[in-house]
C-alpha cells in the first residue's frame, strides 16, 4: 500500500459522545464545550428523520410537500466522478451551479438512483424558513436564547473539502449518513489551504484529497492527522462543531439531508474577520519588511494585545472607536471604511 492509498479514517479517534436529557441540558453542554461532541438521536423524533427511515423517496416527498414554489440553487458535478466538489485542473470549480425548482432537482435524483449515475447533485446551505413552509417548525432543535441561522443541505453522495466557519455549528443528520473529519483551529498550517478569493463556497479549503492523501506534496498533513477526530453519524444524530474548527464532510448514502444551526456569541453588528484579513493582504502584506514589522506592532497594540493601558491617556469622551464597540460606533466605523474603500 502506498501513501496515496492510505485510508486515513479508520485510524482516527472518534469524536466524544455526550448524553443530553433536554434543551436545558443541551444548552449547558454547548456553553461549556470548547471541543466537538456528538449527541446520538438528538433529532430522532423529527418527521423528516422518520420519513427518511422509511425511504429516501419518502423523505423527498416530505420535503416537496413543504417547499415553496421558488428556484433553488443547486450544484451538479460530472458523471463518473467520486462525488468530490472541488477544483478542476485549471483551478476552476469542477461543478456547475444553476437555479431550478426543487421538484426538478429531485426528479434528477430519482432518475440517477434508477440508472446508477454517480453524478453529485448538491443543494447547499438553503435557508429553511425562506425556502420551505412549516419545515423548520416541525423539524428543529431547541437552542434556547440563541438566534441561529437554520440551513438545510440536500444531495447525493458528496465530498466537501476541509474548511471552517466563523460561527458555532450544530449539525443534525436528518436523512442518510455523514462522516465529519475535524481538526482544531490551529491546524490550518498543516491542511494546505487553497486560495481565499476563489473558493467552492466562500471559505478557503484544504487542497488535500482525504481519500488519496499525497504525503509527498503535503507532508505536514501527517501532523494534522495527529490532531484529527472523526464522527460517523446516522439519521437523527447531531455534531457540535466549535467556531473555526476545520471539518471535512462526506455524504455517504445515495441521498443525504443535513440540517445545521449557525450562531455567534458576539453581536451581529461586528464586522467579519475574513474581510479584515483580505484588507490586510491589500494594504499590509506587500509593504517593505520594516513597515510590516511596524504594522504588526500596531495591530498587536490596538487589536490583539489591547487592554486598559492602550487608551488610558485619552479622555473617555474622546475615545470613539477605541472604546468597546457599540452598534452605533460600529456603524460609524463601517461607514468610514466604505467611504475609504470607494476612493
Image (tube, rainbow, N blue to C red):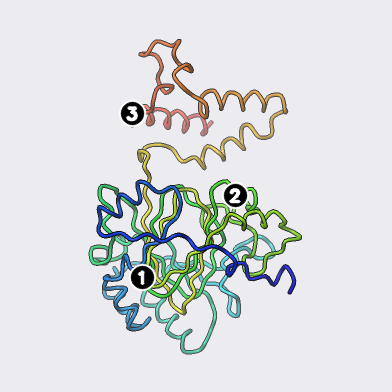
Element type at marker 3? helix
Left or right placement of residue 53 versus residue 8 in this view: left
Local packing at callout 3 (Cα closer than 10 Å; few below 14, some 14-19, many 20+) is: few
Distance in Å between CA atoms under marks 2 and 1: 29 Å
- Labels 3 & 2 near each other (Cβ < 8 A): no
Residue drawn at (48%, 18%) of the image: 310
Element type at marker 1? strand
First reached walking from the N terminus: tag 3 or tag 2: 2
Disc number lying in front (1 or 3): 1
- Labels 2 & 1 near each other (Cβ < 8 A): no
> Against 232, is 245 above or below?
above
* Residue 315 at x, y percent in the picture: 39, 10
First reached walking from the N terminus: tag 2 or tag 1: 1
Left or right placement of residue 82 versus residue 232 in this view: right
Mark seen at residue 187: 2
Disc number lying in front (2 or 1): 2
Location of residue 300 (image quadrant): top right
**Quadrant the N terminus occupies:** bottom right
Residue drawn at (42%, 84%) of the image: 110
Count the marks: how many?
A: 3
> Can you identify the residue that label 3 sits on?
328
* Residue 72 at x, y percent in the picture: 39, 67
> Can you identify the residue that label 1 sits on?
174
Distance in Å between CA atoms under marks 3 and 2: 36 Å
Residue toward you, 19 or 208 = 19
First reached walking from the N terminus: tag 1 or tag 3: 1
Q: In this view of the protein, can residue 206 be seen by the observer?
A: yes
- Labels 1 & 3 near each other (Cβ < 8 A): no
Element type at marker 2? helix
* Residue 76 at x, y percent in the picture: 52, 72
Amino acid at each position: 500500500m502506498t501513501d496515496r492509498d492510505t485510508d486515513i479514517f479508520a485510524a482516527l479517534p472518534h469524536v466524544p459522545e455526550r448524553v443530553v436529557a433536554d434543551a436545558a441540558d443541551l444548552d449547558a453542554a454547548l456553553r461549556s464545550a470548547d471541543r466537538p461532541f456528538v449527541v446520538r438521536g438528538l433529532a430522532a423524533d423529527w418527521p423528516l428523520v422518520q420519513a427518511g427511515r422509511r425511504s429516501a423517496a419518502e423523505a423527498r416527498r416530505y420535503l416537496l410537500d413543504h417547499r415553496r414554489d421558488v428556484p433553488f440553487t443547486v450544484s451538479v458535478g460530472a458523471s463518473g466522478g467520486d462525488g468530490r466538489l472541488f477544483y478542476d485542473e485549471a483551478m476552476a470549480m469542477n461543478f456547475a451551479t444553476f437555479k431550478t425548482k426543487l421538484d426538478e432537482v429531485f426528479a434528477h435524483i430519482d432518475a440517477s438512483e434508477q440508472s446508477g449515475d454517480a453524478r453529485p447533485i448538491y443543494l447547499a446551505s438553503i435557508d429553511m424558513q425562506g425556502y420551505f413552509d412549516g419545515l423548520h417548525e416541525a423539524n428543529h432543535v431547541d437552542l434556547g436564547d440563541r438566534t441561529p441561522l437554520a440551513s438545510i443541505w440536500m444531495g447525493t453522495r458528496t465530498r466537501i473539502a476541509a474548511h471552517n466557519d466563523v460561527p458555532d455549528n450544530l449539525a443534525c443528520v436528518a436523512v442518510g449518513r455523514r462522516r465529519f473529519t475535524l481538526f482544531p483551529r490551529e491546524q490550518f498550517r498543516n491542511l494546505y489551504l487553497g486560495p481565499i478569493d476563489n473558493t467552492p463556497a466562500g471559505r478557503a479549503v484544504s487542497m488535500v484529497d482525504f481519500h488519496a492523501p499525497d504525503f509527498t506534496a503535503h507532508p505536514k498533513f501527517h501532523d494534522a492527522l495527529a490532531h484529527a477526530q472523526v464522527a460517523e453519524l446516522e439519521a437523527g444524530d447531531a455534531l457540535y462543531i466549535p467556531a473555526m474548527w476545520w471539518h471535512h464532510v462526506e455524504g455517504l448514502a445515495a441521498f443525504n439531508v443535513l440540517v445545521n444551526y449557525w450562531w455567534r456569541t458576539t453581536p451581529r453588528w461586528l464586522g467579519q474577520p475574513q474581510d479584515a484579513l483580505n484588507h490586510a493582504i491589500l494594504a499590509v502584506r506587500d509593504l517593505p519588511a520594516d513597515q510590516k514589522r511596524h504594522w504588526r506592532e500596531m495591530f498587536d497594540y490596538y487589536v490583539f494585545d489591547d487592554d486598559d493601558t492602550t487608551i488610558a491617556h485619552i479622555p473617555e469622551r474622546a475615545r470613539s472607536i477605541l472604546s468597546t464597540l457599540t452598534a452605533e460606533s460600529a456603524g460609524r466605523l463601517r461607514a468610514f471604511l466604505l467611504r475609504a474603500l470607494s476612493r
